[in-house]
C-alpha cells in the first residue's frame, strides 16, 4: 500500500497491520506493532520530512514461516552504516526507533541508500 506522509495516518495503518497479524495468529503481535510503528514514523518524519506530497510504500506478508515487513520513503536516504544502538538510547527523545526495531525483530536491513527498511520475524 502507498500512503501520503501524514503522521495522523499512523494509528490507522498500524491497526490494519495488527489486524493482519492477529488474523494469522502471529505471536508477539504487540512487539511487532511497535517495530512497525517506529519504522513507519521514521519514514514519515525523518525520511520524508513530514512532506505530505511524498509517499511511503508499505508491504507486509508471510513467506515460509517468516513475517517480512518493508517500508520505503521518498527521502534522500541516510548513512545507515553509521547507526549504533545501545540500551541507553531507549531513554532519549529521539533515536529509540532503531533500537526498538532491533529488539522486536529477528533481523532488519536497509536498502536503497537507507530509504527502505526490511524487517523480518521468524514465526514458530
Image: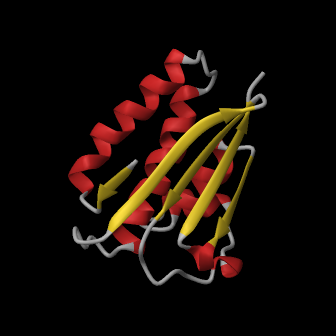
State the residue at coordinates (21%, 51%).
Answer: 8
Depth order, front residue of 104/43: 43
Query: x%, y% of residue 62?
Result: 65, 32
Query: x%, y% of residue 117?
Result: 59, 61
Looking at the image, residue 119 lies above or below residue 96: above
Numbered-mark total = 0
Q: As drawn, is 36 to the left or to the right of 1?
A: right
Q: As drawn, is 78 to the left or to the right of 5?
A: right
Colour scheme: secondary structure
Is residue 93 something that shows in the picture? no
Query: x%, y% of residue 104?
Result: 64, 42
Is residue 122 something that shows in the picture? yes
State the residue at coordinates (29%, 40%).
Answer: 11
Residue 85 image-quadrant placement = bottom right
Depth order, front residue of 69/87: 69
State the residue at coordinates (54%, 56%).
Answer: 90
Question: What residue occupies the far front of the structure in this picture?
Answer: 1
The quadrant of the picture occupied by the C terminus is: top right
Looking at the image, residue 45 lies above or below residue 108: below
Query: x%, y% of residue 86?
Result: 68, 63
Looking at the image, residue 118 lies above or below residue 45: above
State the residue at coordinates (51%, 16%).
Answer: 23
Amino acid at each position: 500500500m502507498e500512503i501520503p506522509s501524514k503522521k495522523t495516518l499512523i494509528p490507522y495503518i498500524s491497526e490494519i497491520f495488527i489486524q493482519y497479524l492477529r488474523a494469522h495468529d502471529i505471536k508477539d503481535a504487540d512487539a511487532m506493532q511497535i517495530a512497525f510503528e517506529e519504522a513507519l514514523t521514521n519514514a514519515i518524519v525523518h525520511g520524508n520530512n513530514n512532506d505530505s506530497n511524498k509517499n511511503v510504500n508499505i508491504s507486509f506478508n508471510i513467506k515460509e514461516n517468516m513475517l517480512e515487513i518493508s517500508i520505503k520513503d521518498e527521502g534522500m536516504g541516510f548513512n545507515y552504516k553509521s547507526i549504533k544502538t545501545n540500551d541507553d538510547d531507549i531513554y532519549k527523545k529521539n533515536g529509540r526507533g532503531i533500537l526498538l526495531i532491533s529488539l522486536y525483530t529477528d533481523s532488519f536491513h536497509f536498502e536503497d541508500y537507507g530509504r527502505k527498511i526490511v524487517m523480518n520475524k521468524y514465526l514458530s
